[in-house]
Image (tube, rainbow, N blue to C red):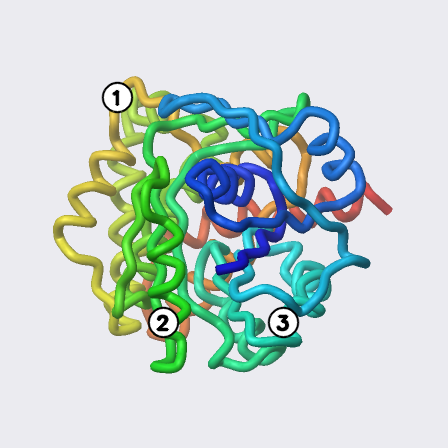
């Protein structure tokens, strides 16, 4: 299977790099600056599961051809449109796209651009970042992807990807009910992104305060209620895991959205929090913690846009 990975940052660089390490045929679609760094230093991964420096194949947008079986879509949601433009030449053949974006709103956009039969479902669980020196740094020990078909015609592509993942240094699973997994990830991410961005602190610092744990669990309950109203109630095992992650004393875990805010960067506020709040309102649910968290990131984005003018 020939795989094109859009981006070589925290998500694409890590999972794509581990696939290269295991012998898979992977090419990275990158911008000129990243291409120069990969040519000079290789793809460098720093991880609790072993560091790696890999010689990898890469292309830039003007050289993409319809020769791939799978396109791994690993951009942030605010780059969704430009990312679709970048991979469009690769989608002219038989390729399917596997998006690892957060939330669910991107599926409709990708379906409209490429057709539903070309868009798989997928979720990535990792805390990683592209450091200023070009290293892909894993920040926490979890590292997992799940993926699955959204149409019967996609099962062959999923099975081929499963074969390519044999021996990789991360956890993975092919699921038939991929929508459930995506919803459960959304519940977890909205909670962690919402609370750590709002409080501008990692989990351990938040729960150290008098009301931090109570407020975090209230936000988690609200997000789970929205998923339940949408027909995808999170399982109790998943909720127990999320409660533990969100209230772990001494934890340095914080969402990338918090780090992006701290660095003054663009964020996925609308995609992760705003879309979920819109669903809460559609179902008539009272979600005060989610509303405050969403307003906070909306105000940050509004101020950032105003100051950039």
Q: Which of 197 and 2 is in front in this view?
A: 2
> Horizontally, is 74 left or right of 233 in the view?
right
Whichever of labels 2 and 3 marks the residue nearer the N terminus, that label is: 3
Residue 91 is tagged as 3
> Horizontally, is 224 left or right of 110 in the view?
left
Q: Which residue is painted at 43% across and 31% down in the image?
A: 254
Residue 31 is tagged as none
Q: Nearer the viewer, mark 1 or mark 3?
A: 3
Q: Nearer the viewer, residue 215 or 182?
A: 182
Q: Which of marks 2 and 1 is in front?
A: 2
Residue 45, image x and y in percent? 52, 27
Residue 240, image x and y in percent? 16, 43
Q: Is residue 96 above or below residue 36?
A: below
Residue 67, image x and y in percent? 63, 66
Whichever of labels 2 and 1 marks the residue nearer the N terminus, that label is: 2
Label 2: element kind:
loop
Q: Distance between the residues labelled 2 and 1?
A: 38 Å
Is residue 219 shown to the viewer in this render? no
* Residue that badge 2 annotates: 149
* Residue that badge 1 annotates: 249
Q: Which residue is painted at 32% across and 47% down in the image?
A: 166
């Amino acid at each position: 299977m020939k795989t094109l990975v859009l981006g070589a940052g925290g998500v694409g660089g890590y999972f794509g790099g581990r696939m290269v390490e295991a012998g898979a045929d992977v090419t990275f679609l990158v911008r000129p600056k990243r291409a120069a760094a990969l040519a000079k230093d290789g793809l460098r991964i720093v991880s609790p599961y072993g560091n790696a420096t890999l010689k990898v194949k890469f292309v830039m947008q003007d050289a993409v051809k319809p020769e791939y079986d799978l396109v791994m879509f690993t951009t942030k949601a605010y780059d969704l449109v430009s990312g679709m433009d970048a991979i469009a030449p690769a989608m002219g053949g038989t390729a399917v796209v596997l998006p690892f974006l957060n939330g669910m709103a991107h599926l409709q956009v990708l379906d409209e651009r490429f057709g539903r039969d070309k868009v798989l479902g997928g979720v990535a669980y990792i805390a990683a970042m592209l450091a200023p020196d070009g290293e892909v740094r894993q920040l926490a020990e979890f590292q997992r992807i799940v993926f699955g078909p959204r149409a019967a015609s996609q099962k062959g592509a999923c099975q081929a990807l499963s074969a390519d993942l044999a021996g990789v240094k991360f956890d993975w699973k092919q699921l038939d009910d991929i929508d459930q997994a995506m919803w459960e990830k959304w519940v977890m991410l909205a909670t962690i992104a919402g609370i750590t961005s709002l409080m501008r602190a990692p989990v351990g610092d938040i729960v150290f305060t008098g009301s931090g744990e109570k407020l975090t669990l209230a936000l988690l309950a609200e997000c789970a209620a929205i998923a339940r109203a949408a027909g995808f109630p999170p399982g109790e095992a998943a909720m127990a895991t999320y409660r533990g992650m969100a209230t772990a004393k001494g934890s340095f875990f914080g969402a990338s959205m918090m780090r992006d805010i701290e660095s003054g960067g663009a964020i996925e506020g609308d995609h992760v929090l705003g879309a979920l709040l819109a669903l809460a309102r559609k179902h008539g649910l009272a979600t005060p913690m989610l509303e405050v968290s969403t307003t906070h990131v909306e105000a940050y984005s509004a101020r950032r846009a105003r100051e950039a003018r």
